[in-house]
């Protein structure tokens, strides 16, 4: 019963008991609606964040690659999703309310010349979202990152050139694990200024993550190998045009993150292209050019740098 997965399931079941009871109540008369597994998300997804929860395929050409692989091109796949366990929303304004979000991202990295599987990350979060208006949203979340790197990185079984990688080719588990708490804010400043009626025409956001030693119902919190690097930040800005042809619109997004374990060296990410809301049911299709300059996206090599550009196709909410 000490498994974090078992503890997570127990917590979710406990939350579902009152949620299931509320579904039998007619709370619409109070001006509020209860939704179990809600598809209407209050907190926005970040277009330029490489670790945002979405499904994505990216062809990337690396101009700086300090992991010393055989190839300077990668075909990366991100398998990610999120859903709301439950929400309370205003009957007359579905963008106002409180919501419990679950989201996960599993980025996978493959060498472009041979498509060999190099490694994968697991990023999991549960977050309580508060949305007092259609232009301001906040989130408090419990965040877990873990990394697994394959022995393809160590071609000659002599140990990886990276000091933070387990050099034994028979031990593929990562030495990189983080369990953080996060405080996130997202603003749509044009809406209260009366310059736009669409909430996502301009988005400004920021995340502050911190490590709090100890345990909670989701398990023992870990931070390794940088045991004293308690903080990291993530922020960005996005802008979208009005619909150009039908529902197609153009967008540009910038994201920057900085980690205490790297003396706050910034990692920059830029995405620009087109997106089609509702291309697949209620999902959003995005085709974009991307540029990245910063720490390796493979978190097990966090003290290594990479610079790349490429084309991405992604689907998210």
Image: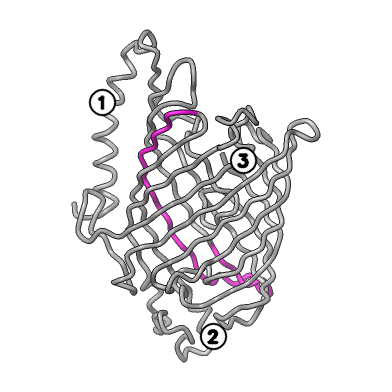
**Closer to the N terminus: mark 3 or mark 1?**
1
Side of 288 where 31 appears, left or right? left
Q: Foreground residue, 118 or 99?
A: 99
Image quarter of residue 130: top left
The structure residue drawn at horizontal position 69% and vertical position 75%, both measured from the top left corner, is 113
- Residue 18 tag number: 1
Neighbour tally class for label 2: few under 14, some 14-19, many 20 plus, Cα within 10 Å: few
Rounded to the nearest angstrom, the CA distance separating label 2 from label 1 is 53 Å
Measuring from the top left, give residue 104's x and y in whole percent.
45, 50
What percent of the width, then of the height, locates residue 20? Answer: 30, 23
Q: Where is residue 121 shown, x and y percent of the image?
A: 46, 62
**Residue at the image point whose x is 54% and y is 85% from the top:** 155
Mark 1 Cα shell of 10 Å, populated few (<14), some (14-19), many (≥20): few
Q: Nearer the viewer, residue 42 or 84?
A: 42
**Residue at the top extreme?**
29
Q: In this view, does 80 lie above or below 65?
A: above
Q: Is residue 233 above or below residue 246?
A: below
Q: What stretch is highlighted in magenta?
A: 108-133
Which of the two labelled residues, at mark 3 and mark 2, occupies the earlier sequence position? 2
Q: Give the number of the mark in front: 3 or 1.
A: 3
Element type at mark 3: strand
Residue 132: within the magenta?
A: yes
Mark in front: 3 vs 2: 3
Q: Mark 3 points at which residue?
A: 202
Q: Distance between the residues labelled 3 and 1?
A: 37 Å
Q: Is mark 2 on a helix, strand or loop?
A: loop
**SS at badge 1:** helix
Q: Which of marks 2 and 1 is nearer the N terminus?
A: 1
**Residue 155 disc label:** 2
**C-alpha gap between disc 3 and disc 2:** 46 Å
């Amino acid at each position: 019963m000490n498994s974090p997965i078992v503890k997570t399931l127990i917590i979710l079941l406990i939350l579902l008991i009152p949620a299931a009871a509320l579904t039998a109540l007619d709370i619409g008369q109070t001006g509020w609606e209860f939704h179990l597994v809600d598809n209407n998300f209050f907190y926005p997804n970040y277009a330029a964040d490489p670790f945002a929860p979405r499904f994505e395929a990216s062809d990337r050409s690396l101009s700086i690659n300090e992991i010393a692989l055989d190839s300077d091109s990668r075909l990366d796949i991100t398998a990610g999703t999120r859903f709301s366990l439950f929400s309370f929303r205003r009957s007359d304004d579905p963008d106002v309310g409180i919501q419990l979000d679950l989201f996960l991202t599993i980025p996978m990295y493959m060498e472009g010349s041979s498509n060999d599987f190099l490694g994968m990350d697991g990023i999991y979060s549960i977050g309580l979202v508060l949305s007092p208006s259609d232009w301001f949203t906040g989130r408090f979340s419990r965040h877990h990152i873990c990394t697994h790197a394959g022995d393809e990185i160590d071609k000659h079984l002599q140990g990886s050139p990276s000091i933070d990688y387990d050099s034994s080719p028979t031990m593929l588990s990562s030495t990189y694990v983080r369990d953080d708490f996060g405080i996130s804010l997202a603003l749509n400043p044009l809406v209260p200024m009366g310059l736009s009626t669409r909430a996502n025409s301009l988005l400004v956001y920021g995340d502050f993550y911190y490590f709090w030693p100890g345990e909670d119902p989701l398990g023992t919190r870990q931070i390794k190998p940088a045991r004293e690097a308690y903080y990291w930040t993530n922020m960005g800005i996005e802008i979208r045009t009005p619909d150009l042809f039908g529902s197609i619109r153009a967008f540009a997004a910038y994201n920057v993150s900085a980690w205490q374990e790297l003396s706050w060296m910034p990692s920059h990410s830029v995405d620009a292209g087109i997106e089609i809301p509702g291309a697949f049911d209620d999902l959003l299709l995005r085709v974009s050019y991307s540029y990245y300059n910063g720490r390796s996206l493979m978190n097990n090599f966090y003290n290594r740098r990479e610079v790349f550009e490429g084309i991405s196709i992604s689907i998210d909410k």
